[in-house]
Amino acid sequence: MTERIRFLRKKSLEAENILHHERAVLVTSFYRDRLLQEDPVPVQRARCLQYILNNKQLHIGREELIVGERGPFPKATPTYPEISLHTLDDLDVLNNRPKVSFKVSPETRLVYEKEVIPFWDGKSNRDCLMRKMTPEWKNAYEAGVFTEFQEQRAPGHTVLGKRSWEKGVLDLIAECEASTHSLNCKEDAEAASKAAQLQSMIIAGRSVIDFALRHADALDQMAYIETNEIRKKELRDLAGICRKVPAQAPETFHEALQHYWFIHLGVVTELNPWDSFSPGRLDQHLLPFYRNDIANGRMNREQAKELLQCLWVKFNNHPAPPKMGVTAQESNTYTDFCLVNLGGLTEGGEDGVNELSYLILEVIGEMRLLQPGSMIQVSLKNPDQFIHKALEIIRTGFGQPSVFNTDAIIEELLRQGKSTRDARNGGASGCVESGAFGTEAYFLTGYFNLTKILEITLHNGFDPRTCRQIGPTTGEAEALTNFDDLMEAFKQQISHFASVKIEGNREIEALFARRLPAPFLSLLIEDCIGKGQDYNAGGARYNSSYIQGVGLGSVTDSLTALRYHVYDHKTISMKGIMDAIAADFKDYEEFHEKLLFNTPKYGNDDDYADLQAVRVFDLFFNAVDGLPCWRGGQFRINLLPTTCHIYFGSVTGATPDGRLAGKPFSEGISPVQGSDKQGPTAVLKSASKIDHVKTGGTLLNQKFLPAFFDDRESYPKLTALIRAYFRMKGHHIQFNVVSADTLRAAQKNPDQYRDLIVRVAGYSDYFNDLSKDLQDEIIMRTEHAG
Amino acid sequence: MTKGLIFDIRRYAVHDGPGIRTAVFFKGCPMRCAWCHNPEGILPRPQQMTRERMINGRKKQVEETVGEWMESKEIIDLLIKDRVFYEESGGGVTFTGGEPLARPGFLMDLLKLSKKHGLHTAVDTSGYAPADVFMQVAGHTDMLLFDLKTTDNAKHLSYTGVDEKIILQNLLSLREDGPELIVRIPVIPGFNDQLSEMVSLRDMLFKIHAPLLRVDLLPYHKWGRHKYEALQMKPPGEFQSVDEQMALPEIMKVFSDAGFSVKKGG
């Protein structure tokens, strides 16, 4: 690592997470003083972006080779009051909460009190959204049956595709103009709205170009007074780059990185999309620039590495916007889920692993930063050596890169109707979510609490915590005389809550399309320009909305316990179980022990238990998959939790699998913590019994003791483990290489373990930044010694 | 259909032969090695063992039976569950113990069934078995993991309870076309960790005809000791742990200098 990178990395790590009012003030001032009511909404939004980018403070840090910050300085994190308004209480909570806090200065608090809150109170999109939701929706939401991703953040969840690496924003603007010219006002009733949309995209594109030019001017000024000749030249060169990109297509490696970064900043300034924004298949997109620069002698491998590392610092400087309430609980982390993809297949279906894939792996290993997240795509066509190199980094125990099955991802995308080309250009973003990069708007809409719905089923549609009848009456538990009756009742409850969620999401999608279009993002994602339609309104080539199931292991084990004890073996009556869970197993120790230890469990390759996983999966899939979303695409499912298994557990009483009230659920599609006793192959066999290809992503974490990785001979064996899981169409696997002893020690002496990073669920985080519940949950996960 | 007493079937065994394997542990062993770390494998009958489990944060002691009479078909059904992992890794199944050769009929049955199902087989043995049994098993397995402890018969007798002659005869009776062979040497401080001892073990290896792939050195560890307590058995011996930083590399060198492929651990 060069001195420069050491310096930049250290600065990034040491920067304090601050909630900064800059964007809130600019947005407020725009809407209050400058908004032209007669402008169509997309144009208003584009002008708002333009106003922010023209007026925000620039930050060009010492030694930087990639420039631009979303806030006025690193980790100064903006807010988006037009989407969700922070109250003064919120600001105090953010400032004071022990985990994932953001410092709020007295100045920020004052500005909020005097300017921001008075203007936006009752007018933010969140206020609108909540007003629109039905009582059924609110009851389910408050009970913790599901969460709502668009409550505090814009839909987004997408990734830059190949086209935007090959074109300048001016090229895209020219396409908008051509599209405008081809509008047929006579025959197309929507021609006017399309023209307005295209106009907004042009304004947004120009705003980002101007933002780059502001940087160029500032860099020239800095160069003028710079006394160090080397830095002077760097600043001049950088100014030249900022005059060229993103306006024109990049031609060099350095230009390509800076090009992406300006685009990234445009997307995350316009709105606060979930999962930030991602550069996608970085080793594929950068390869032509890399090879060209190397061939021309413009750059060597080490210089390329340094530039990449400068970009890594940029990602790390940008925490997720400050989240509150349920949103904070379901995604309790600074990580904003940008996910760099490496490997996989080329568009032509060839092995996509190249020299840059290995170089970027080195970058990941050396930087050891939370952001950006990283993953390797593994197809049958990719070499084992690539996996071995990734394992060398995984063994260092910070949970990166994660490992994905390219062939499964492609099959998933093809099943959803994507073309072969678009599917091969896809990958995973966020935690584990499959998408066609550059061509798909795939919104994650919220988590779905499968085990809670079983609890509600067992109470005949009643939620014992909020004391409300929130589901249909499907029969008292004791009246369900056989297991199929129970499954039928469960099915009806799942369908009911899925419908409530989906109807809510259709409203919400329409709301965002109308109130908060994303003209800049629309410029980037194919076919918005051709269709003259916004990304948030169905302009992308493919549109999907996801509901993310949580707690597959917990719900499976609960159903298995009922099937085994109540119906098949009659060792405990339904009344016995209902009494025991109502008492949180207090004074029911004998039952509790039976449920915990004398019951088949998911994760042991035991068909008796795993069958319930398959049945739950099918119920969930059938209740959701293929239903139309508002934008003209379909609803899909995936199975991942971020940190929502903690929140969902906290709102659910004791469950028939022996879990105590309020305790976390299982995470992803992993077994209940500690219940898998047959080793990793059995876990993978169990996990592959569900049909991953029918999802848009599943998440499986496995904990291994570090000692297991010490032996070089374990690499081919781990590689075989991965290959075998992928042969069975598993979607994703990640390894936590850390011992429970280390984690316990870190819990006791957090100061000594400030650098300890662990895999949570589809992302990594500092152990110290995790809630105590989540720390305990990770410690409880089964560790494989091999 | 034969039955055998099995005390564990462990999937994802990665230290008992090539690739990812499933290890089947036979219960019952004619030897009484003073360092044995699988005491539950010694007696040829089911035993009660106390285990601790956690319920609501409290420890509770429960009695469990160790050792189950299983049919070979039952075992094969379990073994083929991990076929996909064997195929991807070049793995298979390993019969270990206890001493699998102490149940020759059952072992042969399992070996033949495994072959029928296309599984790669390894047998982990002390070599202490009648010559005809040993040769029959050797003729039906792809690999032998053969444990050698010392070349000093008096010491062997006093630390393991059995005569070594029959073991060495069996080892040397393997021919060039026999199964692939890995010799496993437990390194027990105070028993065989002297270099002179290792040199004479090495010299023994020169006499082997069978295709010797590798020598595994298994440093003594104390992990098995709590199991004696749980089984209410008396640990037969007490040893120091092996100094893996200093002593082990020297021992490994004895073998590697002589051209043997040598590895720490299995």
Image (cartoon, rainbow, N blue to C red):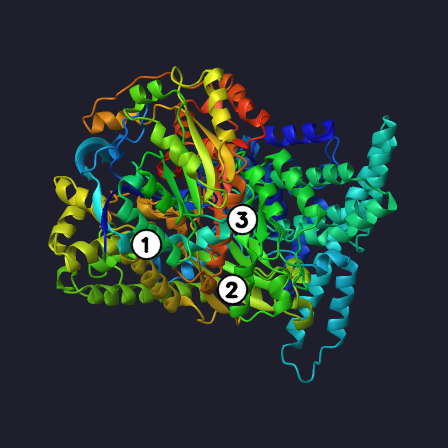
CA distance for labels 3 and 1: 32 Å
CA distance for labels 3 and 2: 16 Å
Q: Secondary structure at mark 2?
A: helix
- Residue A401 vs residue A95: left or right? right
The residue located at (55%, 36%) in the rendering is: A712
- Residue at numbered disc 2: A412
- Location of the N terminus of chain A (image quadrant): top right
Residue B17 point in image, percent of width and height: 45, 41
Q: On what subunit does the disc labeled 1 rest?
A: B
Q: Name the front one of labels 2 and 1.
A: 1
- The type of residue carrying mark 1 is Ile
Give whichever of A54, A315 is nearer the camera. A315
Which mark identifies residue B76?
A: 1
Q: Secondary structure at mark 1?
A: helix
Residue A764 point in image, percent of width and height: 51, 40
Residue A26 point in image, percent of width and height: 63, 46
Cβ atoms at labels 3 and 2 below 8 Å apart = no
- Residue at numbered disc 3: A403
Quadrant for residue A441, please give it: bottom right
